[in-house]
Amino acid sequence: SFFMKKDFAEEIEIQISAGIDFFTEIAKLRAVRLLVKRLLDVYEINIPLVITAKTSQYHLGHKDQYTNLLRNTTMGLSAIIAGVDVLEIRPHTLYPDSFSLRLARNIQNLLKEEALMDKVADMSGGSYLVEELTQKLSEKAWEHFQQIEENGGWIKQATEERIKNILQKTHNERVKKAKKNKEIKVGINQFKSP
């Protein structure tokens, strides 16, 4: 176990990307909180958990960059609805400049000051769709945790590059689906700007 003492840290921060699939991202971020709390309970550790979400640059289109503003807003909104503690909206451009950094900051300000998204404690709580997705993702992730432990643990699997290979395979499958238009991404592979 990597937990040597029960007071090994003052808090745990998990940084995770918020992707473009709105409801799945809400469920994913909620599932992370549930799973980490479950792990902490198993090890009888009572340390505050901070989840930081950053908008994913993986899902941004590079030809029609202003559409990325909408993508970033959607990703940020899903993270807020999921109940993250910290949100970072990344710039909408591949090579950020002062303008794109300002727009990223303004999206956060709009979500907080105009939409008042920071005023509700658990926006998605009780939503059947989100609760069901969260439960399914949590169960699937717990199965993966157990498989990793059965195969020698995280460090062994990372050293043997098994985890890297799984991530690379998933990436390759996503790219293949996008190229064949089997996974629709509006503005990237469907309804592209001329």
Image (cartoon, rainbow, N blue to C red):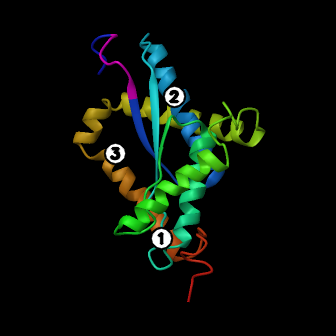
Circle 3 crowding by C-alpha within 10 Å: few under 14, some 14–19, many from 20: some
Amino acid type, mark 2: Leu
Q: Describe the element under mark 3 as helix, strand or loop.
A: helix
Query: Would you place residue 177 above or below residue 33 in this image?
Result: below
- Which residue, given by chain and number where applicable, does mark 3 sit on? 163
The residue mark sitting in front, 3 or 2, is 2
Question: Tag 2, which secondary structure?
Answer: helix
Dots 1, 3 in contact, CB < 8 A: no
Cα separation between marks 3 and 2:
19 Å
Which residues are drawn in magenta? 6-12
The tag on residue 35 is 2
Give the mark nearest the N terminus, 2 or 1.
2
The label nearer to you, 2 versus 1, is 2
- Type of amino acid at the residue the image marks with label 1: Lys
- As drawn, the residue found furthest toward the front would be 113
Choose between 67 and 22: the one closer to the eye: 67
Per the image, the residue denoted by label 1 is: 176
Which three-letter amino acid code belongs to the residue tagged 3? Ile
Above/below status of 61 relative to 3: below
Q: Main secondary structure of the magenta part?
A: loop
Q: Residue 177 or 193: which is nearer the viewer? A: 193
In percent of the image, x 67 and y 48: which residue is there? 115
Q: Is residue 58 visible?
A: no
Coordinates of residue 27 in the picture (x, y in percent)? 61, 41
Quarter of the figure with residue 90: bottom left
- Real-space Cα distance between discs 2 and 1? 30 Å
State the residue at coordinates (56%, 89%). 194
Q: Which badge, 1 or 3, comes first in the chain's sequence?
A: 3
Give the residue displayed 48% in from the left and 66% down from the top.
60
